[in-house]
Amino acid sequence: LRRLTPIALTGARPPSDTLLTHSDKTGVWRWWPFDGNAAERVGGMDGSREGATATTGRFGEPLGALFFDGKSRVRTPQMVPNNSRRFTLELWLRLDLDAYGESGEGEQWVVSQTNGNVDAPCDLRVNRPLETLIFRPGAQGLEISAHVPGLGESGRWRHIGATYDDGEMNLYVDGLAVAHHPAAKVAEVQSNVSQWQGSSVGQRFGAEKGFLLGAVDELRVHTLSRDAAWFATHVGVPS
């Protein structure tokens, strides 16, 4: 695997449009910068904040991300297209502690989308005690996970990426591949449904549990399955 050299990022954060251009607009289907709000920049599919508040972003800017306090969330319109044969989820994540020094629930959902079939949700979550990252693409029976040392560390920004391509799945952390699942015989993600029911950030959709204690920045959904070279090229790790 190609190792990404950390990039020291100091001072003010570049405008979000600059960041999106750098990450290649081609194939970006949804983009929530979370610059202190839940506005969506590609299709106008704004989210609704339910307790999530503005916090310092990964570049140190005061309104650069959204903070989830272990009981808040953002409701978003459809996050992943229907019947997707390939897509990419990517975001910046910072796990935190509460006022009592606790890390919240063991398993915490970063993003979650459902169609009512509990056996086939699309979600990305972390198991903090086990330092494990888990991704389900929305196809029944498919799941990929990776043990990532230091994943549960508080106060550290990490870039998280998850890709799906006709049954093949990959997980990336800070531009490096951490898990791979070879292609399975699955024609489409949820090919038997016409509409997803809803999605959320910071909580397991449809359940009053799995709340995130931490911050999220620059959530994007691509209609392409980005490869290892793309992540190594486009992800700079804040110092």
Image: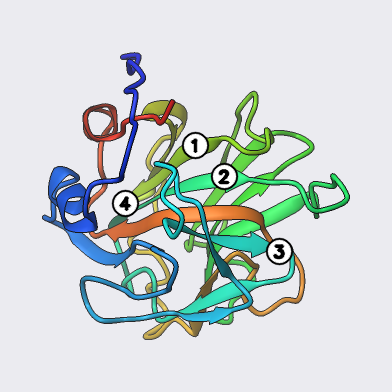
**Crowding near pointer 4: few (<14 within 10 Å), some, many (20+)?**
some
Q: Position of residue 210 (x, y in %)?
A: 73, 63
Q: Are marks 2 and 4 in contact (CB under 8 Å)?
A: no
The mark that comes first in sequence, 4 or 3, is 4
Closest to the observer, 238 or 179: 238
Location of the C terminus by quadrant is top left
Find the distance from the CA under tag 1 to the CA under tag 2: 6 Å
Viewer-nearest of discs 2 and 4:
2
Mark 2 lies on residue: 94
Find the distance from the CA under tag 2 to the CA under tag 3: 14 Å
The mark that comes first in sequence, 1 or 4, is 1
Mark 4 lies on residue: 166
Q: From the viewer's perspective, is residue 30 above or below residue 117?
A: above
What amino acid type is highlighted by mark number 1?
Arg
Find the distance from the CA under tag 1 to the CA under tag 3: 18 Å
Residue 2 visible at all: yes
Q: Is residue 206 left or right of residue 35?
A: right
Mark 3 lies on residue: 211
